[in-house]
Amino acid sequence: MLIDGGSGSGKTTLAAALAPALGAQLVRLDDIYPGWDGLEAASEHVREFVLSAVPRWRRWDWASQAAAEWHSVDQARPLVIEGSGSLSRANRALATCGIWVELDEPTRKARALERDGELYAPFWDRWAAQEQRFAARERPREFADLVLDDDAVAAIAEGLAS
């Protein structure tokens, strides 16, 4: 399962609720992006490694700005992959389900900056431009099996938590 949407849209909240309910492993692209210009590389990493015949992923060490250790993926368990750039056409062809999380940009930006504070603020525009280029080329919303708004994400997360 691929969960995509803009930064601050609610992808992480949805994935954190769905993965345990499904008994699934959770792979977060935040752990894979190779720096602030890494959306495309992480999307390709999903196709080349996470959804491959020998599924695995390599963590990016943000502190040292270098690739770190590899992590294996248990093929016997379901998999939830969450992050901007996860729902490319090539990735969707290899996954069982694609979900797009929809939320307006002002709300997303406020949430993301509240969540990540001053660390993210100088990079918002740079990251948003990558998301826009990806969305224009890949059209992830169109390839999603399900499009969820903020109310739906909240209801699902709340329902699975109780």
Image (cartoon, rainbow, N blue to C red):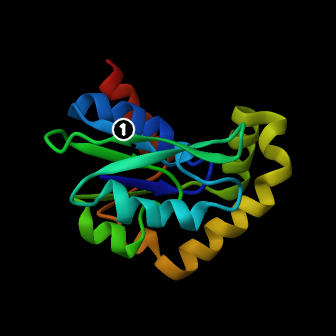
Q: Position of residue 131 (x, y in %)?
A: 62, 66
Most foreground residue, 131 or 61: 61
Q: Position of residue 154 (x, y in %)?
A: 45, 35
Residue at the spot 35% in from the left edge and 74% down from the top edge: 90
Q: Position of residue 125 (x, y in %)?
A: 79, 61
Q: Amino acid at mark 1?
A: Leu
- Horizontal placement of 47 versus 29: left or right? left
Q: Secondary structure at mark 1?
A: strand
Most foreground residue, 86 or 159: 86
- Is residue 28 shown above or below 162? below
How many tags in the picture? Answer: 1
Instruction: Find the residue positioned furthest to the bottom.
Output: 137
Most foreground residue, 140 or 33: 33
- Horizontal placement of 112 versus 41: left or right? right
Disc 1: CA contacts within 10 A as few (<14), some (14-19) or many (>=20)? some
- Mark 1 lies on residue: 26
Quarter of the rendering containing residue 141: bottom left
- Is residue 68 shown above or below 127? above
Q: Position of residue 33 (x, y in %)?
A: 58, 53
Say which quadrant the C terminus sits in: top left
Residue at the spot 44% in from the left edge and 70% down from the top edge: 140
- Horizontal placement of 112 versus 158: left or right? right
Most foreground residue, 102 or 28: 28
Residue at the spot 52% in from the left edge and 57% down from the top edge: 5
Quarter of the rendering containing residue 45: bottom left
Residue at the spot 84% in from the left edge and 37% down from the top edge: 118
